[in-house]
Amino acid sequence: MRQDDKIVRSISDFVNYLAEDTKDIKAPIWYRGHAIKDWELSPLLIRKKFDSEMNLLKKFKQDATLFLNPRPTAQYEWLFIMRHYGVPTRLLDWSENPLAGLYFTINEHPNDDGALWVLLPLELNKEGNRVLEDPEHLPSFEEDEFMQSYSPEKYNQEKMTEMLPIAFMAPRNTSRMQAQLSVFTIHHRQKISIEEVGIKKHIWRYCIPKDSKERIKNELGLLGITKFQLFPELQSIGEIIGGKQ
């Protein structure tokens, strides 16, 4: 990885490490929290055998359409919504907000060490086995012809090609995605976790010991990073009032 793991026991630890480690980086930086340190950066649909992505998408659309206004117009837009509501996809969601990423390391599995992954998305894309039209900017499905190879339609139709995961821009088409400043990587058929791609200069992590999770959760609360801020929905209000947060 780009650097050795560092142990974070408080918000101040995290801010100090992050300031030092990113001081010379001018490109975008993304964050993803894992409540269990040893989890790989590989989406569920790639790691385990599920129904095909297209079939999952059809099943989701069958019942989810009623709840969405406006409705997505492209197949790939449905993938983003599916990912945020627990359906296996080829996507991994990240955040542009480091504290949002940190929240997900401490909110579950209190008896396990967690990890906050830090990604340089442009560096990940440069590791790809094809050249993007503009390697200094993140591609999008709407604009970049290369990204069409990752779309659900092409992925379902063409069965032979294997490409590395890539980072891209996506519309934030739900309040949850906007609140979390969501961004995404998407896998293709090459079954490799993001931390194992190439020379590994695009990624590093901070490790959160299990006995520091409660302290960090309380400190995040003081800074306004709570479940309702990241999940601005009625269910969150009910869980907070009911003491389940």
Image: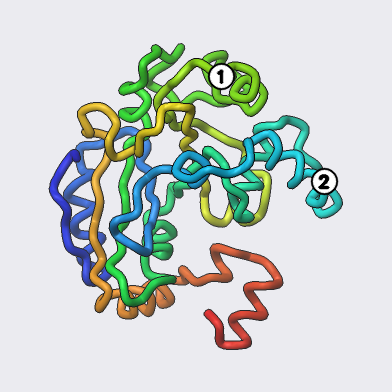
137 displayed left or right of 123:
right
When asked about the image quadrant of residue 126, the answer is top left
- From where the camera sits, is residue 183 visible? no
Q: Amino acid at mark 2?
A: Gln
Q: Amino acid at mark 1?
A: Lys
Instruction: Give the number of marks.
Output: 2
| Mark 1 residue element | loop
Q: Residue tagged by mark 2?
A: 62
> Quadrant location of residue 77?
top right
Q: Position of residue 64 (x, y in %)?
A: 79, 51
- Residue under label 1, please give it: 159
The residue shown at (33%, 33%) is: 27
Q: Nearer the viewer, residue 200 or 17?
A: 200
Q: Tell me residue 137's x, y (percent).
A: 43, 24
Looking at the image, the residue that sits furthest to the right is 66
Query: In this picture, is 64 found above or below 231?
Result: above
Is 3 positioned to the left or the right of 182 in the image? left
Residue drawn where x is 58% and y is 44% of the image:
50
